Image (cartoon, rainbow, N blue to C red):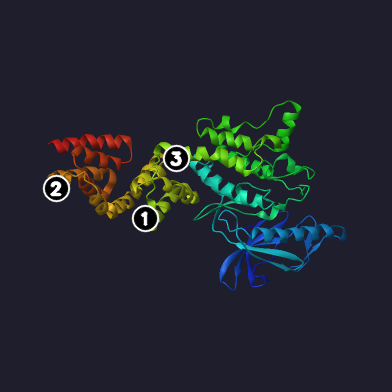
Amino acid sequence: MIVNQKALPPRTRIGHYQIDKVIGFGGFGITYKARDLTLKCDVAIKEFFPSDIAVRVADGPEIIPVSQQQANDYKRGLKRFLEEARTLAQFKLQTIIRIHTFLKKHGTAYIVMDYEKGLPLHAYLKSCHTLSERETYCILKPVLRGLKEVHTAGILHRDIKPPNIYLRKRGVPVLIDFGSAKHVMANGRVTNMVTPGYAPFEQYNSRDIQGPWTDLYALGATMYRCITGVSPTNSLDRLAGLTNDGIDPLQPVSIVASGRYNNTLLELTDWMLNVQIADRPQNVTEVLQQLNPSVHNINQHNRIQTPNLEKWDDAILDKITEELTRYLGPIANLVVNDVKNSVLDMKQLCRLLANEIESKLQRELFLRNTAQYTINHQSENLTSRNNTTTNHKNNQSLSDMIEPEKLKNAEEELAKYMGPLASTLVRHAADESDTIDDFINILTDDIPGEHEREAFTISIRASMAS
């Protein structure tokens, strides 16, 4: 549990909200989990508390400037905090934390937001170390779309990093902690706030102009961490290296991860991470223009161009997502949402999802555990497919012609690999097949493991020929 001695204690009331606990804090404020006593739901509340220029009055909730000299800075900061809340409240984007309202109390202000259940990206990375190519895209694409909208409104996030990308239990990732975001002033100059490794050099000096390129550097740094497993070198050290001896101490991700990821993704990350502002993309549109072709091509050889999942039962997709979560964690839902738009049937969906699991054993377990959902879906659609196909001669399938004893032998052999599902698999394979070859091919598709498929094929061919 997060503890901050300057924070409001549990059960403190702010309007009709009751503080539960602290869930985050930084130089500009404290974030609490709270309860909306009217709507009976949980919310997150961000309190404006710039700790370098303000203090909380002893034994009370009131916040005051440290001195009269700091009063004007505090007043300007509070005004900007509320202006930003009004601006962010206009957005109804899945990737941007949703603002409910704000309150002015105790000499400060509070922004009331959605309370999201899930896991910060940095916590997920602690367990898996790096992300797969598809997982990286599943986070990058929605974050870029959200950034494009807020940049158009004149807002910079200014602290993009793994802790500030939240992986919802269901749905797209969400950008949180806009407490460091500042309206871009007419001259483009804003206050200093940095996270080493993720902040570009211009954030270290309030005289340097910041813009969308500033957030894009931080997002590139986040991608670098997702791909390599380590945070990038501090941008000031990089600038010093380039200035003194012409050598950047940060090794390009296109070298570190060469051959493991799509080249376009690696080159895009390096582009966003250029030290000099002029060498980076200047806006999100430029990034999306380079990203889209590679998004289209990722695993293209496995994709089918006519999606058919819209009519499928959402409950089945939920079960498959739940199973995938055992291996990928909270990012599983993002991967399912991405993959499902490019397949025709549940079997192909499960096979593409299995490709995202690093361990061979876990891939096979996933395929085995999801086989029942594939069959359920095939069973639901079998009648409609048979009504529209003329492939079966005289409307007869292999199940009408093959000896029951041979079908039973096939069930027993398949049970060695698929367990109790074998009888259902054999029945459906026989119903959909015209020849023994079709029958065997359908069954081997359901067996995880190349050697196992080969052994089954040899055995079943011998059984059918006897």
CA–CA distance in space, label 1 to label 3: 30 Å
CA–CA distance in space, label 1 to label 2: 30 Å
Task: Please say whether residue 365 is visible from this viewpoint.
Answer: no
**Residue 424 at what x, y percent from top left?**
24, 50
Depth check, mark 3 against mark 2: the one in front is 2
Task: Name above or below for residue 22 compared with residue 207.
Answer: below
Amino acid of disc 3: Glu
Please tell me whether mark 2 sits on a helix, a strand or a loop: helix
Residue annotated with mark 1 = 311
Report the disc number at residue 358: 3
Mark 1 vs 2, N-terminal side: 1
Name the residue: 77% across, 57% down: 77
Please tell me whether mark 1 sits on a helix, a strand or a loop: helix
Amino acid of disc 2: Asp
**Crowd around label 2: few <14 · some 14–19 · many ≥20 (10 Å):** few
Mark 3 vs 2, N-terminal side: 3
Depth check, mark 1 against mark 3: the one in front is 1
Mark 1 vs 3, N-terminal side: 1
**Residue 231 at what x, y percent from top left?**
62, 39
CA–CA distance in space, label 3 to label 2: 41 Å
Left or right placement of residue 62 versus residue 131 in this view:
right
